[in-house]
Amino acid sequence: MSFRNKRVTDFESKDCSGCALCVACCPKNCITMQSDDLGYMRPVIDDSLCIDCGLCTKKCIIENPEALSHPILTVAAIRSDEEKLILSSSGGVFAAIAEQLISKGWMVAGCIMDEQLTPRHVLTSNIQVVKQMYGSKYVQSNTEGVYKDVAEVLQKGKKVLFSGTPCQVAAVKRFTKNNENLLTVEVICHGVPNVEMLHSYLDLHSRASIKKMIFRDKRQGWTFNNLLELNNGKTKKINHRLSSYMTYFLEGETYRESCYVCPYAKPERVADITIGDFWGVVNRRPDLKNLIDIEKGVSCLIINNEKGKSIVDNCKIEKYQVSYEDIKDGNEPLNHPSRHTEKRTAILAEWAKNKNWADVDNYWKKHDFKFSYLIWSHIPTSLQHKIRILLGKR
């Protein structure tokens, strides 16, 4: 197929994941990522510089998906150092892998939240920066520049661990020709809202007063509850059921259009290693309740090739072999792309009015807030966990 004269700006919104690989590949540096009318990042081409070479389309990981592979080993996993589990969203597997590789001289690329509460990918050998990568970030990160940074250090003989969503992993693999010194770790990804949505939501909580946002505060249990660390030293807990942002994220209503047709949301995987929460572990493997402290979180660890296995075998991770079906049962993106309801149209219409999350929040209060959620939020964390176990929610 000839890609000459075809440009990524010709694609429909559903055909762009926002990975920004086209920006890195362009030989004329004429592509930039800019937000569209809803705040989702899309490529924009400077026509005065473009030579219509078609490389941006040829390299596109949505138009031409990266090769996938079937897992060779699937396990329930937690890092051996339980005291450090508090820093991670589930079983702390990424943290255990990253710390092991940093100690061996590797560099790590992953998503942090910067001082402006903006998610962005960085490449580092500093363990303190790597720790900022721990924990989920339910928003799309800015990857501009990181693929070139990774390629540059790989060319110098350095080894790199890259973590991200499947489309970001596909992008870095393609840009670096899947260099033998590159190890990729993908998160099980449902989809991504955009940073303008997140910032506008945080404005409802006085964003300027917020020092740090933790999307999943383990001190509130293995759940999706947020914690805001404020500049004055105080903290603010947010139950996810009382958050319009988290409600619509978890219901799958605010993702970019490409997420609903994602070519990487299937049993076959693009990364060397896939990690996520092992939702449904109690129902699928009740025997593990006697071996793992479920309340502290459990990861599913999906090893997709021998490169991934050789790394995991040397990390301080407790592993319990399970079937892939056990893991897939509680993780929709391992089966098919996320789905949304008709409600998405109304939510995005509210957002589009002024790109002010207050409008969405008012819609949520009118249509989706339930008083029972407020009552639940006042139940002690340990009791919530016991109730979830009894109801088969873990």
Image (cartoon, helix red, strand yellow):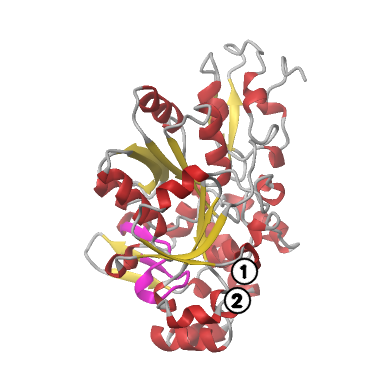
Q: Amino acid at mark 1?
A: Asp
Q: Residue 323 appears at what percent x and percent y? A: 61, 65
Tell which circle, 2 or 1, labels the residue nearer the N-terminal end. 2
Q: Which residue is mark 2?
A: 284
- Residues 344 and 25: in front is 25
Q: Is residue 20 visible?
A: no
Q: Dots 2 and 1: beta carbons under 8 Å? A: yes
Asked if the magenta segment contains residue 72, the reply would be no
The image quadrant where one finds the C terminus is bottom right
Query: Would you call the spot at circle 1 few (<14 residues within 10 Å), some (14-19), or many (20 or more)?
Result: many
Q: What segment is highlighted magenta in the picture?
A: 210-227
Q: Position of residue 117 (x, y in %)?
A: 38, 50
Q: Position of residue 238 (x, y in %)?
A: 42, 71
Q: What type is the residue that disc 2 sits on?
A: Arg
Q: Which mark is residue 326?
A: 1
Find out whether residue 218 is within the magenta segment. Answer: yes
Q: Position of residue 43 (x, y in %)?
A: 59, 30
Quarter of the figure that contains the N terminus: top right
Query: Badge 2 local density, few (<14 within 10 Å), some, or many (20+)?
Result: some
User: Distance from label 2 to label 1 (Cα)?
Assistant: 6 Å
Secondary structure of residue under mark 2: helix
